[in-house]
Image (cartoon, grey):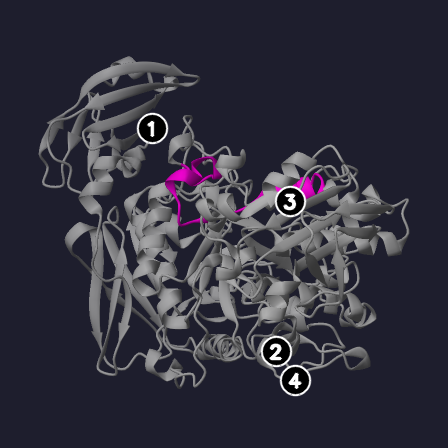
Amino acid sequence: MLHIHRTFVAYLDGMDQLTVLVPKSCRPDGMTPFAMVAPGGEEIPLAVQQTEELGDAVKYVCRFSSAFTFGSTYWVRTRSGEMTDVQIGAVVRTRAFDDQFFYEGKLGVDYTKEQTVFRVWAPTATAVNVKLIAPDRNDVRYVPLERGERGVWSAAVPGDWERTYYTYVACINRVWREAVDPYATAVSINGEYGVVIDWEKTRLAPSAHPLPPLASPTDAVIYEVSIRDFTSHPDSGAVHKGKYLGLAEADTSGPNGTSTGLSYLKELGVTHVQLMPFTDFAGVDERDPQAAYNWGYNPLHLYAPEGSYATDPTDPYARIVELKQMIRTLHENGLRVVMDAVYNHVYDREQSSLEKLVPGYYFRYDVYGQPANGTGVGNDIASERRMVRRWIVDSVTFWAKEYGIDGFRFDLMGVHDMETMKAVRDALDAVDPSILVYGEGWDLPTPLAPEQKATMANAGQLPRLAYFNDRFRDTVKGSTFHLPERGFALGERGGREQAKTAIAGSLRALGGLFCHPLQSVNYVECHDNHTFWDKMAVANGHESETVRRKRQKLATAIVLLAQGIPFLHSGQEFYRTKGGDGNSYQAPDEVNRIDWERKSRYEHDVRYVQGLIALRRAHGAFRLATEAEVLRHFVFLEPTPPSVIAYRLRDVAVYGPWAEIIVIHHHEEKRETILLPDEGEWDVVCDGERSGTTPLWRVRRALDLDGIGTWVLVRAEAINAR
C-alpha cells in the first residue's frame, strides 16, 4: 500500500492539465519536476507551463500528453518521491468533459417484480454501490454497480424490491459519499431516501371530462395558489386542510356560506391554477408539518412530490396518488395546473445529491473558483452544461407526462441559459403545445454571458416563452421595493405613458419589451413582497379604506383587460393582507393562509373581479395574440385628462360578440367627462361597482366618470344584432 504524506495537492482542471499546489513550507523548488503515475504504474511527465505564488503556496499549472482515464485513481510524484492522489477538479466544467460524458440513455430506476434496474450518472467516481434498505431499516444490502458508457453506473438487481429505500454510495476523490438519486421519482419521509415503487399502482382512471381547448396563452387567466394556504384556515370548510386532497374537495364553504377552495376557483372563472412549489422541499418537517411553515423554494428532489401536503408522508405512494387525484379533480372542473418549477438552485449545495455524485459539475463558479450566487441563496445551477440541461428537460417532461401538468412557471428563469429554455419548450411541444412556459426574466449576477441568459432582454430570441412583466407591475402599482412610490392605479400621473405601453401588451413596436402579447404576464401582486393592500397601507395610507378598495379594483381591472396574459395572486380580489410582512416565506400559517372570512366580507368586490374575468373570456379582443393584431385593433383615445387612460378596440367583431369596445381607467376620486368617439350608442358592461357581459345602461356621445374605477363600453348595435 502506498504511503501518502499529503504535503501537497493536485487537481485535474483540464483534459490535459493538472494544477499542483505546494505549500511554501515544503520548499517547492525542490519538488519539481513532477510526474503523474497512471493506474498501471506508468509514469507520465508533467510539463510546468505556469508558476504563480498564492499566499502561502506556489501554484504550478502542468500539461501532459497521455489520455486521462476517468474512473481510475492517478497520482502525482515529486522529484523527492512524495505522492498525492489526483483530485478531479475544474475539468468537470470544461466543454470537453461535457462532450465526452453526455449521456442520452435511461437514468433512474426501472422496477418490475422480477428485478429492479438502477442507473446513475457519476463519471468521476471510481466505484459506486446502490444501498438497499428494507422499510423497517433492519436489513441493509450494498450492491456494486458496473461502470458503463459515458460514466453511467448500473446494475439489475434480481427480486421484488418494491417499497425498498435506496441511495447511491460513490467513491470520488478517494472519499465515499452517500446520495439520493437525482432522478428519484419517489422518496421517503423528508426525502431522506429514494424509494422503489410500482408506478402502475399510481395510475388513475382516465378523466371523463376532458379539458376545454386552449387556443392561445392569452386565453389563460392564471391564479397563484399555495396548496397549504388555500385550505389551512379553520373556516375553509375543507376536511384535508393544507393538503393535496383539500384542494380537490368539492362544494366547500366558509363564513356566511361563502364558497371556498375548489368551488371558489370554479366560480371565479380562472383557467389556470399556478401552484407554489410542490416538489419535495426542505424547511418543513414532514413528520410534524404544523411545526413550521415554508413556501417551498428550498428544492431537494425535483422529480418527487412534497410529503407535507400528503395525508401520510410516511407512505411513498400517498403523496404521488393524492397529488395525481388533486390534479385530475382540477382538470375535471375545467382548471389547468401550472407547476412552480424551481430549477435555478438547490437548498444546500454541499449536501445536495448533485454535488455529491459529480462534485463541481452542476453549479456555476466565478473566476476565483467560488460558487456563484446570482440567485441570492448560495448557489446557481449551471443549466448550460449538457447533463444539467438534460436533468431539467427530463424533469419537466416527466411532470407533464406522468402528472398531466399544463404549465411551468420558472423561478428566476433569467439565471438559466436560453438553450435550456428552448429545449424545455421543444420537449413540452412534443407532449402538448398548449403547455404554458413562463417565468421570472430578471437579469441576475450569475457568471453567464448576458447574451446567453433567458432574460427579458433576450425575449426576442425566445418568442414562445412568457415573462413576468415587472414594468407592468411597477407602472400600475409603483415600485415593489420602495413602498411609498405610487404607480398609476395609486394616483401617480407621471408614469401614464409607460402604463399605456404596458396595457397595450408591452410591445417593442410601442416602446415595450416583447415581440408579441403572448410574452407578457401582467400582474400587480404575487407571493413575493408586500401584497397590493399592504403596499397601499404605506403609499396611500392617508386615504380611506373605501378609496383604497377602489384603487385595488382598478389595478385588478387593468391586469384583466390589458393585452397579454393576466395573473392574479390568490386573495388579491378581496384585498389579501399579510399584516405588512413583505417576505412571509417562513411566517406562520396565520400570516400566509387565505382568510375566507375576509372573502365573505368583500363578496361584492369578488363578484366584480369575477365579472371582469367573464368579460375577458367573452371576447377575443382582450386576448389578441400577435403584434400585428394589436397594432391594427388597439388605439388610445386622446385627448383625455391626465387621470384617465382610455382605449378603443375597433373592428373586433371577428373575435367576439361586439364590434367595438372602449375601456376607460380613471385613478382620481373626482368627476370627469369623457367624450366618446362617434355618434353611436354604447352599452356600459362595467363600471366601478359592477362588471360582466350584461349591459348596465346605455350612453351616447359622452360618459361621466364618478371617481376611481374602470368602465367598459361596447357597441350597442353589435349586441342588438345578436
**Residue 607, quarter of picture:** bottom right
- Hey, what amino acid is under mark 2? Gly
Residue at (65% x, 84% y) in the render:
251
- Disc 2, disc 1: CB below 8 Å? no
The numbered mark, 2 or 1, whose residue comes first in the sequence reads 1
- Provide the secondary structure element on which disc 4 rests: loop
Q: Is residue 250 above or below residue 323?
A: below
Lateral position of residue 2 relative to residue 605, left or right: left
- Hey, what amino acid is under mark 1? Thr
Q: Residues within 10 Å of mark 3 (few under 14, many from 20)?
A: many
Q: Residues within 10 Å of mark 4 (few under 14, many from 20)?
A: few
Of badges 4 and 1, the one in the foreground is 4
**Which of the image's four quarters has the N terminus?**
top left
- Provide the secondary structure element on which disc 1 rests: loop
**Is 527 colored magenta in this rendering?**
no
The numbered mark, 4 or 1, whose residue comes first in the sequence reads 1
Residue on which the image places disc 4: 251
Where residue 231 appears, as percent x and y from the top left, is: 67, 73
Residue on which the image places disc 1: 7
